[in-house]
Amino acid sequence: MVNLALTEAAAEKAKSLLASSPEGHTALRVAVKNGGCSGMRYELVFDGDLRDDDDELEFHGLKVWVDPESATFLDGITIDFSDALNDAGFKIDNPAAEETCGCGESFKL
């Protein structure tokens, strides 16, 4: 099972967005894909299809799904949400990242 954390602020914002997403979406999928300016990028999307090999977590009433390939890169991360005027959005803290880009959406291990 992947070891990640989602703050209450992030869970509440995700639940709010999920409520207005297309019908059938029931969870937040956290994944890692190739790309971004540092080599790999985080992906946060709403999904309705839990796969047999997904890890299923719950934070503050929000279901979170992680596929096994992404779990390796997400171990130990914390996902937060900020609504600050100049820096609003989901923020991911990855203590294992050797390098991150300025926007915080991509990283290198």
Image (cartoon, rainbow, N blue to C red):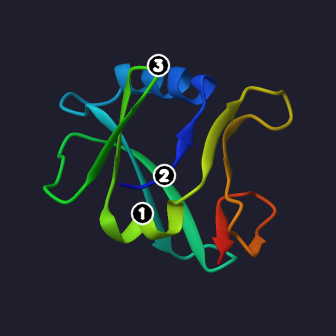
- Please tell me whether mark 1 sits on a helix, a strand or a loop: helix
Outermost residue, right direction?
Answer: 86
Q: Measure the alpha-carbon separation of dots 2 and 3.
A: 24 Å
- Please tell me whether mark 2 sits on a helix, a strand or a loop: loop
**Image point (52%, 60%), residue name:** 75
**Label 2 vs 3, first from the N-terminus:** 2
Residue type for callout 3: Ser
Tell me: 103 left or right of 4: right
Label 1: how many Cα within 10 Å (few below 14, some 14–19, many 20+): many
Residue type for callout 1: Ala
Provide the residue designation for mark 3.
16
- Foreground residue, 35 or 77? 77
Provide the residue designation for mark 1.
71
Provide the residue designation for mark 2.
3
Tell me: 20 left or right of 100: left
**Label 2 vs 1, first from the N-terminus:** 2
Give the image location of residue 77, x and y in percent.
Answer: 60, 53
Give the image location of residue 6, x and y in percent.
Answer: 55, 36
Q: Quadrant of the C terminus?
A: bottom right
